Amino acid sequence: MTDDFASTMDAALRELTHSPGGLPGVVAMLTDRDDVVYSGVAGERAAGSGTAMTADTVFAAFSTTKAITGTAALQCVEEGLLDLDAPAARYVPEIGELQVLEGFGTDGEPLLRAPKRDITTRMLLLHTAGLGYDFFDENYRRLAEGHGQPSVITASKAALRTPLLFDPGERWMYGSNIDWCGLVVEAVRGRRLGEVMRERIFEPLGMADTAFTLTADMRDRLAVVHQRGEDGTVVPMPEMVLPQDPEVHMGGHGLYTTVPDYLRFLRMWLRDGDAPGGRVLAAGTVADAVRGGLDGQQITALPGVIPALSNDAEFFPGLPKNWAYTFMVNEEPAPTGRPAGALGWAGLANLYYWIDRQNGIAGFWATQILPFADAVSFGGYLDFEAAAYRRSAASRIR
């Protein structure tokens, strides 16, 4: 059964990377609680380069960074260093200066007021603080284009000083919450986020190829980000590399990683926080962290307001979805076979993962192509996940 799955997936990846309008390259891996059970690689690191994609290719992780930052925050909670329900301004005073955007005046200037309540770190983890992204929100896009608001890609403090789009705690909105959460971790630990992650997450897990700054060896294995044009072709953008000496280690999107490294992180969640180099999280923390925390609120679709960066995006339209620390939780079984209560999320350049603690499997799909929710890459990922569940079902029958 495993051989059939591997040969089927290998053929599918080759088809995706050799067809007109396909993908430049992809790495897809599946793991159980103990080890990788499938490793698939196809295509090139940069379209037309002749440099083959490999299993150890380095990817800009984008928002798959978020779950690692959430883990660092939960470690602070375990040690009694962080109160999730205290004002986040206790740790990072600047977040207490953010105001709520009520619209724009006749002169085009933002209309701002004080928020009704403080932002807490729990709100940051749950994406209910009131923060957004300019590629998913029209008001933020207007601030960027008309008022010089820097993009989060600049990895600057100025990029994080955006107004709130609603009062903290009132609803879910995906945005720069976890970047602020990373600053909370730094304040609590008194060290840069990358240093905290290396000591407390990467070293115990054996994640030697994950960092905010590329080493020379990582750069040699780096996949290039591509842009898909309206005609379906993909164009390499080798100049698109995240800041390598950033003012802020952006906990929401700033890491580089490999798929084998990220699977080590996913396995930790399958193993209740345990890792080869020592426990990363207590089992009780994991049990609390994987539950949806929105208390009746739901995740909404993400509208792509900057077409070059994102299409309209939603996992499993029509199914209710919650948010945990810090993953999406589908509350009903998904069409791919993912059970209710499983976890997952994605990164802007069409990276996708899921964690199924019930069945003990997790998968990661890595490409480097914009805009987000690319039909070819997202469709290929969903096919990969569905094939993994067909494999599991066939194994049980056998």
Image (cartoon, rainbow, N blue to C red):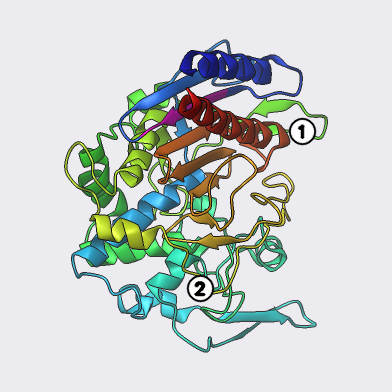
* Residue 29 on the magenta span: yes
Does residue 101 sit above or below 290 in this rendering? below
Q: Which residues are magenta?
A: 26-32
The picture places residue 23, in percent across and down from the top left corner, at 66, 24
Q: For this view, does 9 lie left or right of residue 95?
A: right
Q: What amino acid is labelled 1 in the image? A: Gly
Q: Which residue has dot 2 on it?
A: 129
Q: Quadrant of residue 266?
A: top left
Residue nearer the viewer, 281 or 167: 281
Task: Give the numbered dot on residue 229.
Answer: 1
SS category of the residue bearing label 1: loop
CA gap, disc 1 to disc 2? 34 Å
Which residue corresponds to the image point at 55% horizontal and 13% vertical from the top-left? 7
Decide if residue 160 is on the left or right side of residue 277: right
Q: Is residue 309 above or below residue 120?
A: above
Residue 186 forms part of the magenta stretch: no
What amino acid is at disc 2?
Ala
**Name of the residue lying farthest toward the top:** 50
Q: Foreground: 20 or 189?
A: 20
Q: Residues within 10 Å of mark 1 (few under 14, many from 20)?
A: few
Mark 2: which secondary structure? loop
> Is residue 300 among the parts visible in the rendering?
yes
